């Protein structure tokens, strides 16, 4: 065979090769178009799939153009390169908000990627040989081989993860949807947006027990600006496997217990371990205080020692309060308590759920307000258990979880706190900070929820009391999907001018006000306060002060007709204690709150005459 004939024959063989393999990724595209995977990282994967399909087409076109030029160099007419385009549709797979996956269609995607990887690997080898024999660049063959390797990598990764998830979720028929977080960021976290936060890297390192990475995760979580954070943590956790999970929980209980997205049962286990460790540490320090005080006096460091001793004593009070809250679980038929987070330092923080929020049909989270500290949180634990008791009594076939969320630092009543922008009740700063934490916690509740077999979604209600209603109102405005319903009681304002601004239907925004609750009557607080005028009275949240104009960050009065919320009846009480009367056992107010939690709005008692 002459050189002319050999070059033309090579061109014809490569043209056939291109015709057979240019569309190797189209079956995978069809699987994506068939909703094998919608949401989560699907759009990123689909974008890669489209790009590799285009690169494959370009590689074959480039190889054919090289051989066509080689034919022309032999003196023959340059052959036309056949069109290699496809009419196949590469459908969009939705946004990054998870919507679902079809395991059967996903298996088709995996099979098509396996076939494509084998075909393209062989095609790359054949093309490399053809181009090399004709003394032209083999870069296009290399590119096709890389695309085949990509398909092989995706096939192996998706197959292993799909198998792991199906094992994790137990018996699952082929058409059943998987949990949102697992699909969106567990099965496909390689395609989730990485952004600039370093979350993907931190998760990878944390899985190997890197404490610095775990600290990084908690810092990213506390920013509250990534709505995917908890879902990605949840899927990362599930993909670790039982052995790695146990190892991390045992080695780093403080970090795992605080990490949003870790299942509630695991957080409870980790936090109880950490709480026991803290109790041993504090009790040990208390035993040594007398000897330490004597030595401090000798060293002339008595003042510093007393500061330390007071801090230890405060931590002990905070710990005792948590133990009280936990003891309320399991009483009189009530659900077990789950310790979802705590911090003994300063005014303290604690998150306790009565009932497992991951498996509950109805979840309510309570956010407290002004003056709340962990060492005076016993009454708040009682409020939350009263809500569980009544909601469950009214709907005993449902699983309930009632959560006491002291996950932020509320403004305090002392004058020093009042006069500081970052801690004053007259400022939105504490509420904005708390809103970031609360939004992140809501993300966690969504991420760890286990889908119900009947397909009905669990109902999440957020309840804010006093200044906590501002925290809740700001949180729902910063996070779409924050909650299914809102309850505000004793609220001075929720940071909005109308119920429709709160991210849910106004029919799902409920306000309760005791007639004698002066805080609920404030509606808005002053922008400018003469802090030198009667400062001792400003320590009380029930003291009305003169003002120049309303504080815009508190918004309109949520109890007004103009605000547009639903309002439920609260019995009149004496002025003393009216601000805390909403959870009194056997009260109509508690009955209404329970009906709202259960989603039985039609059973609530409205205001007289309405």
Image: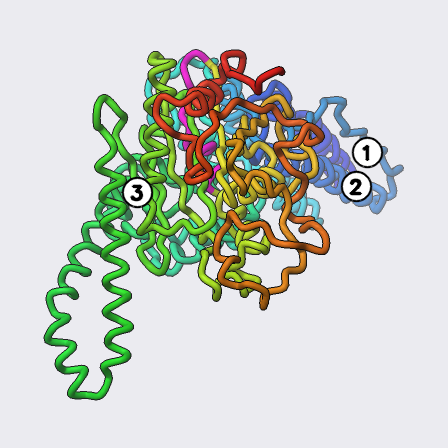
Q: Is residue 384 magenta?
A: no
Residue 446 vertical position relative to residue 129 in the rendered view, above or below: above
At a point 70% along the width and 45% down the height, the residue shown is 134
Judging by the rendered image, the residue that carries numbered circle 2 is 65
Distance, label 2 to label 3, CA atoms, is 79 Å
**Secondary structure under the numbered disc 3 in the rendered image:** helix
At a point 33% along the width and 53% down the height, the residue shown is 343
**Secondary structure under the numbered disc 1 in the rendered image:** loop
Q: Is residue 451 magenta?
A: yes
- Looking at the rendered image, the disc whose residue lies closer to the viewer, 1 or 3, is 3
Residue 3 relative to residue 528: left or right: right
Looking at this view, name the residue that lies furthest to the front. 574
**Secondary structure under the numbered disc 2 in the rendered image:** helix
Name the one closer to the observer, 146 or 354.
354
- Report the span colored magenta: 441-454
Whether pointer 1 and pointer 3 mark residues with C-beta atoms closer than 8 Å, the reply is no
Residue 583 relative to residue 74: left or right: left
Structural crowding at the residue carrying mark 1, measured as other residues with C-alpha within 10 Å and reported as few (<14), some (14–19) or many (≥20): some
Residue 173 relative to residue 560: left or right: left
Q: Quadrant of the N terminus?
A: top right
Judging by the rendered image, the residue that carries numbered circle 1 is 81
Judging by the rendered image, the residue that carries numbered circle 3 is 378
């Amino acid at each position: 065979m002459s050189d002319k004939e050999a070059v033309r024959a090579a061109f014809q063989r490569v043209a056939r090769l291109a015709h057979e393999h240019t569309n190797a990724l189209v079956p995978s595209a069809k699987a994506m178009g068939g909703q094998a995977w919608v949401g989560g990282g699907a759009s990123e994967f689909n974008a890669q799939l489209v790009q590799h399909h285009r690169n494959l087409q370009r590689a074959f076109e480039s190889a054919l153009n090289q051989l066509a030029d080689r034919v022309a160099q032999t003196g023959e007419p340059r052959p036309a390169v056949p069109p290699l385009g496809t009419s196949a549709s590469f459908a969009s797979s939705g946004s990054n908000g998870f919507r679902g996956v079809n395991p059967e269609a996903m298996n088709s995607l995996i099979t098509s990627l396996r076939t494509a990887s084998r075909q393209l690997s062989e095609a790359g080898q054949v093309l490399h040989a053809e181009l090399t024999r004709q003394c032209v660049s083999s870069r296009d063959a290399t590119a096709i081989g890389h695309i085949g390797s990509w398909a092989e990598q995706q096939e192996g990764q998706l197959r292993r993860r799909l198998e792991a998830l199906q094992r994790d979720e137990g018996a699952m028929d082929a058409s059943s949807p998987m949990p949102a977080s697992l699909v969106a960021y567990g099965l496909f976290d390689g395609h989730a947006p990485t952004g600039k936060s370093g979350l993907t890297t931190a998760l990878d390192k944390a899985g190997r027990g890197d404490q610095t990475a775990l600290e990084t995760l908690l810092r990213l979580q506390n920013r509250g600006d990534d709505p995917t954070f908890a879902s990605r943590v949840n899927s990362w956790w599930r993909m670790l496997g039982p052995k790695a999970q146990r190892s991390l929980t045992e080695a780093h209980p403080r970090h795992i217990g605080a990490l949003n997205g870790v299942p509630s049962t695991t957080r409870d286990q980790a936090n109880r371990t950490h709480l026991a460790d803290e109790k041993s540490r504090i009790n040990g320090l208390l035993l040594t205080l007398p000897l330490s005080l004597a030595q401090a006096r000798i060293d002339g460091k008595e003042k510093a020692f007393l500061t330390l001793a007071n801090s230890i004593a405060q931590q002990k009070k905070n710990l005792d309060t948590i133990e009280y809250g936990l003891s309320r679980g399991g009483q009189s038929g009530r659900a077990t308590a789950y310790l979802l987070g705590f911090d003994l330092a300063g005014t303290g923080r604690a998150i306790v759920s009565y009932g497992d929020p991951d498996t509950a049909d109805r979840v309510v989270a309570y956010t407290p307000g002004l003056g709340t500290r962990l060492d005076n949180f016993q009454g708040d634990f009682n409020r939350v258990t009263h809500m569980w008791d009544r909601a469950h009594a009214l709907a005993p076939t449902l699983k309930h979880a009632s959560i006491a969320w002291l996950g932020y630092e509320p403004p305090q009543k002392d004058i020093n706190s009042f006069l500081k922008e970052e801690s004053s009740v007259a400022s939105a700063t504490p509420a904005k900070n708390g809103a970031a934490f609360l939004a992140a916690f809501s993300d966690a509740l969504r991420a760890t929820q286990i889908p119900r077999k009947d397909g009905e979604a669990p109902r999440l209600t957020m309840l804010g009391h006093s200044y906590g209603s501002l925290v809740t109102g700001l949180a729902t405005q910063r996070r779409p999907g924050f909650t299914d319903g809102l309850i505000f009681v004793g609220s001075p304002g929720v940071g909005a001018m109308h119920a429709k601004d709160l991210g849910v239907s106004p029919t799902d925004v409920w306000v309760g006000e005791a007639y004698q609750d002066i805080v609920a009557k404030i509606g808005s607080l002053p922008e400018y306060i003469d802090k030198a005028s009667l400062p001792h009275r400003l320590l009380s949240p029930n003291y009305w002060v003169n003002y120049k104009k309303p504080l815009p960050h508190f918004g309109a009065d949520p109890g007004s007709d103009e605000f547009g919320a639903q309002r439920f009846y609260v019995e009149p009480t004496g002025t003393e204690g009216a601000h805390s009367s909403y959870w009194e056992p056997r009260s109509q107010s508690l009955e209404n709150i329970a009906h709202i939690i259960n989603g039985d709005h039609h059973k609530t008692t409205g205001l007289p005459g309405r």
